[in-house]
Amino acid sequence: MNKLIFRKLSLDILVFFLLSSVSITLIIWVIQAVNLLDIISEQGHGIKIYFVYSALNIPKIFSKIIIFTFFLTLFVVLIRYDENNEIIVFWTNGITKISFINFIAKLSILFVIFQLFLNLLIVPYSQNLGQEYLKNSSSEFFPKLIQEKKFSNVMRNLTIFVENYNDLGELKGIYIKEKISNTENKIIIASKGKLEKNDEGFNFKLFQGEVTTINKKGNYNFGFEETNYNLSKFNSKTRKYKKIDETATLFLFKCFNKFKKVRKENKIRCGENNSYLLKDIYEEIFKRVVNPIYVVILSLISSLLILKPKSNFLQNNAKFLLFLLGFIIILFSQLSYKFINYSTPIELIFILLPIISIIIFYTFILIKTKFRLNYL
């Protein structure tokens, strides 16, 4: 019988968690997807690329909100059980309050493992996959980004201006400025031209113009009747470097292990193609590994809902105070990584703080449920 009761509790928690987390994730994803529209409007990528890239952000969003949705789930489910007198079923079947709380705590450990799986493997992989997909995709909407009588900076180191431009890709009054280096620029002026696409990408076929090269030595120019100007050699404005949250956890641990004695340095970097400050690597590892532990603390705080305080003030405000405490801990957990780069004692405190907090809360619960001291 007890197994059936706990199974129903688990199912209620799981269903509410999935509904709330999926709903919140979708809301955040839609808002974020709107902010990512510049992938089309400014970088010239296609709609398919935009949707794939934005969809690959979902694991990161889901991982970020787990700590809040799990706390919210426990809070809502336990309040509902209490208000509907369903919680009495546990006590009438001989289930003690400490057994009930132990079950909630064990369940929270499964969520910790799940979030660690997301943080350490799925999120970095999906973030990196999305950026690689975007980086290697061509600017399909490039023709739409060229506007008449406006300077267009669609590509890095390239500025384009046209007097007239029609749907057939025909242009008139063309001005192209290419930044070759910090000291050298190339300017191309053509009376007319056409934008064409081949297997390599887009290029301009230009007619009746001249090319001027400007550098430290001076400038020189030559005229042409017809020439092709290849655009595929230019990079789009899409970011080419990899952010630290897109980096594999194994790489971060290798860097940390190699430089652990100077892990707080903000000048030493680790990595070749993509290098990161040791300080940032240490903070990222902390966020991925330590932050999920706070889920257990929040489960213990939620469990306090089943313990009725004697004080009238606490009875009347217990739900609000516990929710406020949980919300403060969530905020603290998201900011705690900032403190690990201070002195070694402070660093150790913030690394061990989740474990210490679990021990303190659980000890308090043991006192409340087992020892029944006279202040209860």
Image: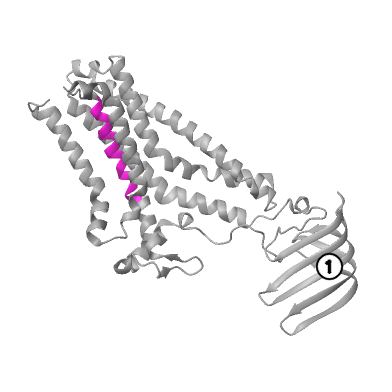
Q: Amino acid at mark 1?
A: Asn
Give the main secondary structure, helix, strand or loop, of the magenta stretch: helix
Residue 108: quadrant of the picture? top left
Which residue shows up at 65% across the image and 48% down it?
38
In this orientation, does residue 119 appear? Answer: yes
Look at the image and say whether residue 56 sits in the magenta stretch: no
* Residue topped by disc 1: 228
Q: What colour scheme governs how the chains and residues are painted in the rendered image of this protein?
A: one colour
Which of these two is toward me, 320 or 53? 320
Question: Where residue 27 sits: x, y (%)?
Answer: 52, 34
Q: Quadrant of the C terminus?
A: top left
Question: Where residue 174 sits: x, y (%)?
Answer: 85, 62
Which of these two is toward me, 253 or 64? 64
Q: Secondary structure at mark 1?
A: strand
Residue 75: quadrant of the picture? top left
Residue 87: quadrant of the picture? top left
User: Badge 1 local density, few (<14 within 10 Å), some, or many (20+)?
Assistant: some
Question: Where residue 276 sits: x, y (%)?
Answer: 44, 64
Q: Read off the magenta span.
A: 289-305
